[in-house]
Image (tube, coloured by chain):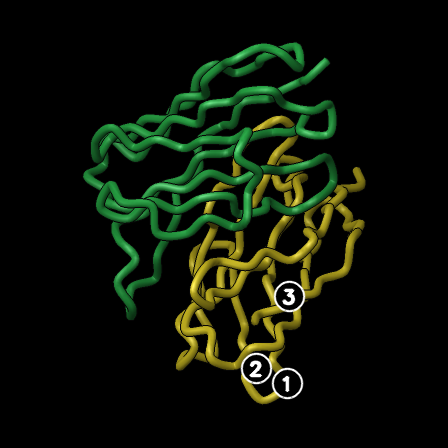
Chain colours: A green, B yellow
Amino acid sequence: DTEVTQTPKHLVMGMTNKKSLKCEQHMGHRAMYWYKQKAKKPPELMFVYSYEKLSINESVPSRFSPECPNSSLLNLHLHALQPEDSALYLCASSQDRASGNPDTQYFGPGTRLTVL
Amino acid sequence: GEDVEQSLFLSVREGDSSVINCTYTDSSSTYLYWYKQEPGAGLQLLTYIFSNMDMKQDQRLTVLLNKKDKHLSLRIADTQTGDSAIYFCAGRDDKIIFGKGTRLHILP
């Protein structure tokens, strides 16, 4: 199983809503990532979890709150978002981030988020 | 930190070879990657190359690495319509840094 799944595929929310994006992998990977991708742009790293601990936060606004309940699951909680936060949110996982490893990341299909 | 540059657009006839080029700035990147993204989909890792290698071949894909010039290329032999996608070059510093992506368009 080399699949990373993400739910929902599409999400439309208002600026006052609270919602969550979910990501799951069963490859035994110990590193998981959230990326944000705007149209015609490369993915931008938001957060990295390594062994269920937050290891990188790329100065993401606090209206985005990640959570890693266990080694297979990664959530992104959304609250009070702005229209400019509309984007494709990609989850990825890799075996681990030990130096010397290729850190080959497997990506999910993404959640397309629209903030009204 | 790492900076990765690539041309934004490439148009190739079906059956010809496609060559997508990329330059990077940080010679300490130990791995360099090529990812493919089809419309509406996530990224798919195509291949990666370790920095002490010059070339890696995998079926229709050939990756060439020129460390002196910090230049990476991806050659796709016998390009098919299914190869139409955006191709991202990426380097790894502490984290993976993606180039802006090259949109490959296949002409009939």
Q: For the point 74% across and 40% down, which residue is it?
A: A40
Q: Secondary structure at mark 1?
A: loop
Sequence-wise, the earlier of marks 3 and 1 is 3
- Residue closer to the observer: B3 or A104: B3
Label 3 resides on the chain identified as B
Residue that carries the numbered disc 3 in the rendered image: B4
Which one is closest to the eye, mark 3 or mark 1? 3
Residue that carries the numbered disc 1 in the rendered image: B69
Placement of B22 over or under B27, stated as above or below: above
Q: Position of residue B7 (x, y in %)?
A: 77, 60
Label 2 resides on the chain identified as B
As drawn, the label of residue B52 is none
Q: CA distance from mark 2 to mark 1?
A: 6 Å
- Asked whether the residues under marks 3 and 1 belong to the same chain, the reply is yes
Q: For the point 79% across and 37% down, which residue is it?
A: B108
Q: Position of residue B78 (x, y in %)?
A: 62, 51
| Residue neighbourhood size for the residue with mark 2, other residues' Cα within 10 Å, grouped as few (<14), some (14–19), many (≥20) | some
Residue that carries the numbered disc 2 in the rendered image: B66
Q: Amino acid at mark 1?
A: Asp
